[in-house]
Amino acid sequence: MRRLLLALTAVSSLGGCVQTKQYADLRFTPPQGDYRLLVLRPDVSVGSVTTGGVVEQRADWTEAARTAIVTALRNQQGGRGGQLFIAERRNSVPGADAETVAELERLNFAVDQAIAEHKYGGQYLPTKRRMGLDYTLGEDAIAFGRKTGFDYMLFLHAEDQVASSGRVAMQILGVAGCFIGFCAPSGGSGQLAYASLVNLRSGEVVWFNVLQTGSQIPGMGFGDIRTQAGADQMVERLLGRMKPGREAARTTGARQ
């Protein structure tokens, strides 16, 4: 997980801004209409940044954020016309046992790590396209789709770091110090989220997006995902502007 997150944070150096960067299979078209989408339990982590800059995970904050994100996913995907199923537990996926779901999660994590390192971390592979995606979960994903009847599967990870009052004071001091020629170390609040969409008919990862925010001063970052409004913002930024692949967009443009 740490290697994957380090690669994803290479998207940009952020200071009080929000940025997304997505890749899609060249022929990918965002799902619309009558399709079945499985969303596995979102991997969420929320912690408090202490005065010394250490992140302490908070189980209560994490659970509040996960609940809000699940609600946001239901609302956001409901507008696309598909049939959505969010698996709160591994043994709750219709037609699949918990171990099969866990194996697919591990496989997807390994593929996501490769995408992060080679697409976002600058470690390009000569055998992979510079544009688009060229990654697959293989026959295991296809068999899973046939068994469960789902067309797509979505994986989502989100983490948030909330600065404590002591850390906030340090941030303000650091900003003030810049005016007199000295900038104290920062590293305060910030969010990182990513999502990958797998086509269960082909086994391919057809779309991948990263959302990263950063803030040096309280109130300048993105919404608090522990709240419904903040979770809605994050999910909409991450999934609401899904772009088609280059070839699909070119074909659509030609038809228009």
Image (spheres, grey):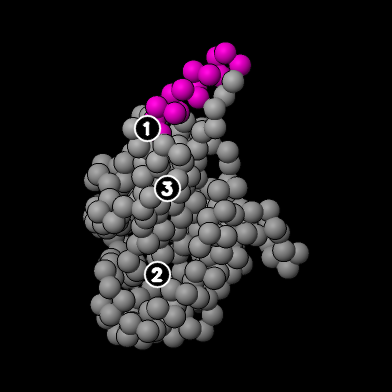
Q: Which residues are magenta?
A: 167-181
Amino acid type at image mark 3: Val
Q: Residue furthest right?
A: 126
Q: Is residue 126 left or right of residue 86?
A: right
Q: Looking at this view, is 39 or 175 the one in front?
A: 175
Q: Looking at this view, is 148 or 40 the one in front?
A: 40
Q: Which residue was labeled with disc 1? A: 166
Q: CA distance from mark 2 to mark 1?
A: 41 Å
The answer to whether residue 252 shows anywhere in this view is no
Q: Is residue 190 magenta?
A: no
Q: Give the residue drawn at x 44%, y 85%.
A: 143
Disc 1 secondary structure class: helix
Q: Is residue 125 left or right of residue 80?
A: right
Q: Earlier in the sequence, mark 3 or mark 2?
A: 3
Q: Earlier in the sequence, mark 2 or mark 1?
A: 2
Amino acid type at image mark 2: Met
Q: CA distance from mark 1 to mark 3?
A: 13 Å
Q: Which quadrant would residue 45 be assigned to in this image?
A: bottom left
Disc 3 secondary structure class: strand
Q: CA distance from mark 3 to mark 2?
A: 31 Å
Identify the main secondary structure in magenta: helix
Q: Give the residue drawn at x 26%, y 69%.
A: 88
Q: Is residue 176 magenta?
A: yes
Q: Is residue 221 left or right of residue 34?
A: right
Q: Which residue was labeled with disc 3? A: 55
Disc 2 secondary structure class: strand
Amino acid type at image mark 1: Gly
Q: Give the residue drawn at x 39%, y 84%.
A: 100
Q: Which residue was labeled with disc 2? A: 153
